[in-house]
Image (cartoon, rainbow, N blue to C red):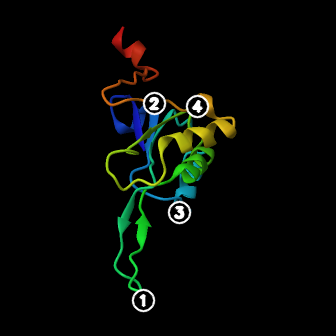
Amino acid sequence: MLELGYGASSTDFTCGYRIYISGDTLMVDELNEIPKRYAGHQIDLMLAHLGGTTIPSPFIGRLMEPLALMVTMDAEQGLQLIQLIQPDLTIPIHYDDYDVFTSPLEDFQRMVEAAGLGDRIVIMDRGDQFRFLVKGLEQEQE
């Protein structure tokens, strides 16, 4: 969690913009701690690592068949994360960097739309910029 804001010291810090960055993870029980820790606090933006990234695992058992392990969220888990964290906006990232992705961005978009949350995601192309205002800094700059 990144908290951007202002204050002369840590004791008078005022958060003006809060960003959650998922990192390479899956929907695990530990993520349930985030809404508990930030209850009553707005999460303005979430950067969600998606794509259902897979990596090969060692051969399993006597079958000697390779097994792929997923290490980033797929579309369904991305939707579950939005529903859990409830950010104002979500930007999906890291979903097409390699050839080991199993869950295309279109699947995520379709699921989010079906859940009625389409207005809460921002799809960006490489090189795009997302601009936001850290609340409270406008007074500091005057």
Q: Residues within 10 Å of mark 1 (few under 14, many from 20)?
A: few
Could you say which quadrant of the image residue 65 lies in?
bottom left
Q: Secondary structure at mark 3?
A: loop
Give the residue type that dot 4 points to: Arg
* Alpha carbon distance from label 2 to label 1: 49 Å
* Disc nearer the start of the sequence (3/1): 3
Does the rendering let one see residue 114?
Answer: yes
Q: Residue under label 3, please give it.
A: 28
Does the rendering let one see residue 40?
Answer: no
Give the residue type that dot 1 points to: Gly
Q: Nearer the viewer, mark 1 or mark 4?
A: 1
Task: From the top left corner, tell me how far across and down residue 20 is, in percent.
Answer: 45, 42
Q: Which mark is residue 38?
A: none
Give the residue type that dot 2 points to: Tyr
* Disc nearer the start of the sequence (2/4): 2
Q: Secondary structure at mark 1?
A: loop
* Disc nearer the start of the sequence (1/4): 1
The residue positioned 38% from the left and 85% from the top of the image is 64
* Alpha carbon distance from label 2 to label 4: 16 Å
The residue positioned 36% from the left and 74% from the top of the image is 57
- The quadrant of the picture occupied by the N terminus is top left
Count all numbered tags in the image, as a single digit: 4
* Alpha carbon distance from label 3 to label 1: 26 Å
Q: Nearer the viewer, residue 12 or 65?
A: 65
Q: Nearer the viewer, mark 3 or mark 1?
A: 1
Q: Residue under label 4, please give it.
A: 120
Q: Residue under label 2, please give it.
A: 17
Q: Which mark is residue 61?
A: 1
* Disc nearer the start of the sequence (2/1): 2
